[in-house]
Image (tube, helix red, strand yellow):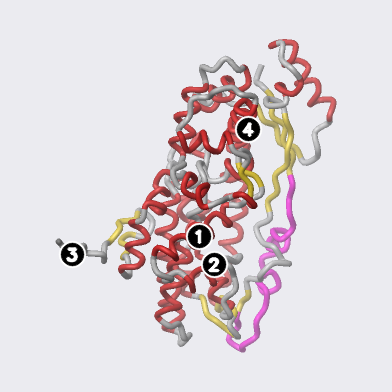
Amino acid sequence: MNKVNKLKIFNDPIYGFITIPNSLIFDLIDHKYFQRLRRISQMGMTYLVYPGAHHTRFHHAIGCMHLMQRAINTLVFKGVDISREEENALLVAILLHDIGHGPFSHAMEHSIVTGISHEAISLLFMERLNVEFNGSLTLAIQMFKGEYHRKFMGQLISSQLDMDRADYLKRDSFYTGVAEGNINAERLITMLNVVDDELVVEEKGIYSVEKFLVARRLMYWQVYLHKTSIVAEQLLMRVLKRAKELTNRGVVLKASSALDYFLKKEVNHSNFTSETLDVFSLLDDYDIVSAMKEWQNHEDFVLSNICSMIINRDLLKVKLKNKKHKIENVNTYKDRLMKQHNISAEEASYFVFTGEITNQAYQLGAQHINILYKSGKIQDIVKASDQLNLKALSKPVTKFYICYPKE
């Protein structure tokens, strides 16, 4: 049998050539659970706003692994002691951090599966893979859960300046064409250091951190919380919710076996079994798109119309305000729709609804981004920066939306 060359190279549009560092990483990337990420969109329905945003969780995970390699090399060069086992664990943890995402990234968590996050499902996948790979992922799982004693390693995986954010801001900026999000990830990583087992950024990197936080704020308003993205995501969740509701009433809907399983079962954290994980691993964006193409011709008014809206990008109208929308306005739109199509108030609520979005680029109470001065002094970025905007960026800004049919 021919021996497989496991030291492969990816050609990434963001970073250029990315090398797979060892056979364990190769085998994890090659695994069907990870290959599924090629069929999970990184940015959900955002391609309806920015046509280029068709990149996947697979792209993002490989990019995160590459940045983690760079961060490890930087820290080792600066004298931080990282063993070969710890290095492998960091690479595995960041590679698999998003493996539990469902179709279109977040839609399932808020519709046909309740009380279990994609992080929890990622952990279930990692534990399953750990059995398959004879315990090779034990340390990575410990780090992923934030239980490893070396705090900075957990911060590289999940914090306010982690490899996940460093990749998705730069990658999403590239694929959407929104230049404001284009951070200098390489410089940020070059400025990293460790003091008392905590991650810090050297003083020279202060402006790169400022740019990172401002870029994060702008990307949230312009891309992640774009009003059209919000309404498309809400409609997708309502498609799945309505499909589950109809299935529970005994209506038979054409769907893939994997999607059918989640429509028929009440799935939450307590009953997410090994069998559920097997079925979940077969579910991706294609199941949902295929179902919506079929359901747009269904006799149910709600299901068919919402599916048609998404498939043909004929979405609801959405208005954003700085204060809550009056209940009278909501009822006016609902009453009009009920009379026009002879539907119930419950059915009308699928097309007329309100909600809120919040943008907070930096959380002061959470893990800090600390700046290390040449004198050895360490200070939070908000205090260290002469950029007055940073204090404002640490305050949450909330906006309220209302969605209703265009007519």
Spatial distance from mark 2 to mark 1, Cα to Cα? Answer: 7 Å
The residue stretch that appears in magenta: 372-398
Q: Residues within 10 Å of mark 2 (few under 14, many from 20)?
A: many
Residue drawn where x is 50% and y is 60% of the image: 97
Q: Label 1, on which residue?
A: 97
Which is more N-terminal, label 4 or label 2? 2
Residue 199: in sight, yes or no? no
**Three-letter amino acid code at the position of disc 1:** His
**If the image is split into quadrants, where does the C terminus sit?**
top right
Residues at circles 2 and 1 in contact by the CB criterion of under 8 Å: yes
- Report the residue marked by disc 4: 241
Frontmost residue, 104 versus 211:
104
The three-letter code of the residue at mark 3 reads Lys
Which residue, given by chain and number where applicable, does mark 2 sit on? Answer: 144
Task: Give the residue pinned by disc 3.
Answer: 3
Q: Residues within 10 Å of mark 4 (few under 14, many from 20)?
A: many
